[in-house]
Amino acid sequence: TQPLVEVRNLTVDYVGANTVSRAVNGIDFDIRPGEAFGLAGESGCGKSTVAFALARLTRLPGLVSGGAVRFMGEDVLSFSAERLRRYRWSEVSFVFQSAMNALNPVIKVSEQIEDAILAHRPRASRAETLARAAELFELVGISPRRLDDYPHQFSGGMRQRICIAMALALEPKLIIMDEPTTALDVVVQRDIIEQICELKARFGFSVLFITHDLGLMIEFCDRIGVMYAGELVEVAPASAILTAPQHPYTRALGRSFPPLSGPRVRLEGIAGSPPSLSALPEGCRFSPRCGEAIPICVRLAPELRPTPATGGEAACHLLQ
Ligand code: SF4
Ligand code: MG
């Protein structure tokens, strides 16, 4: 089957007055229909930059400077204004960490959801939009009796659910979620993620999921791409990220997160910090922090190659 999204050699720069830093350096991955694909990595590794490029939301000083993003085979980066409107309104929707703060405080949530529905189905009647709003509230676990409330009458978790309901109103094929539950407490987070899982199974949309919580990502995603300093270093089934990590950085990342079950162990952080994009090391970008580096690592950048052990791919000289 054709992937829903194909990212090919995607390159995104941040353009300053006298400098250009490459935030995303030629990455390749696919998102399959109905799949939840996660992007993992330390903050600043380029995950959100990739998400923005997929939604065609890159704004200066960010600039997509190379590569392609294809959605159902169509080239997203060359969409016309009209085609882009359709893409944004009915094919892809975005839920951010702070989405809940984007609700208009002086307008009842029912009206805000109805507006989202009308943008998608301009000819819907008032009765239809109301019925649909009630249905969406029920889908995300909020009583439709609360449709006439204002945003401040809801908790943060509920407002985030309302944003997810609005994202669903558009019946998207892809929902991009960048830290969608990070501002919420752990129990509410898990609850919302479980609900999104159910909705995904029911409606068959795909998800691009970004979170710093590797445990949550492994539970929720089918496959995970691990990014380091603007590059993908490993792509693997989620279950393999902890049980059979192939890349030294994936192993280090796994050791720095609490285990999903079993006894609590002391976490080893990853020594050192990611390189500045304006002073990247020669060869493998992870080499200054890698405990397994060999001489070639500081001379030659490794390329992503298939890893038979996981059925995924990794970029490391030790594997080639
Ligand atoms: Fe470590 Fe070398 Fe592999 Fe980079 S290529 S992760 S430095 S072993
Ligand atoms: Mg981010």
Image: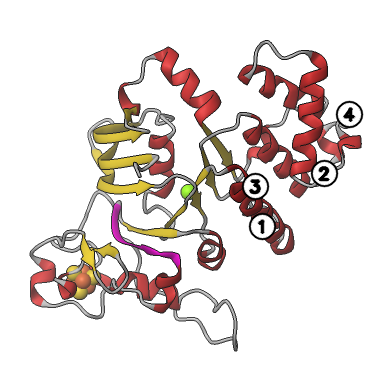
Query: Does residue 106 appear in this view?
Result: no
Instruction: Answer whether residue 20 is magenta in the image.
Output: no
Few, some or many residues within 10 Å of mark 1 (<14, 14–19, 20+): some
- Distance, label 1 to label 2, CA atoms, is 15 Å
Q: Earlier in the sequence, mark 1 or mark 2?
A: 2
Q: Is residue 10 left or right of residue 189?
A: left
Q: Quadrant of the N terminus?
A: top left
- Front position among marks 2 and 3: 3
| Circle 2 residue | 142
Q: Earlier in the sequence, mark 4 or mark 2?
A: 2
- Front position among marks 1 and 4: 1
- Distance, label 1 to label 4, CA atoms, is 26 Å
Q: Are marks 2 and 3 in contact (CB under 8 Å)?
A: no
Q: Residue at x 30, y 51 (%)?
A: 230
| Quadrant in which residue 224 is drawn | bottom left
| Circle 4 residue | 148
Q: Residue at x 40, y 72 (%)?
A: 240
- Distance, label 2 to label 3, CA atoms, is 14 Å
Q: Quadrant of the C terminus?
A: bottom left
| Circle 1 residue | 194
Q: Residue at x 40, y 64 (%)?
A: 237
Tell me the tag on residue 51: none
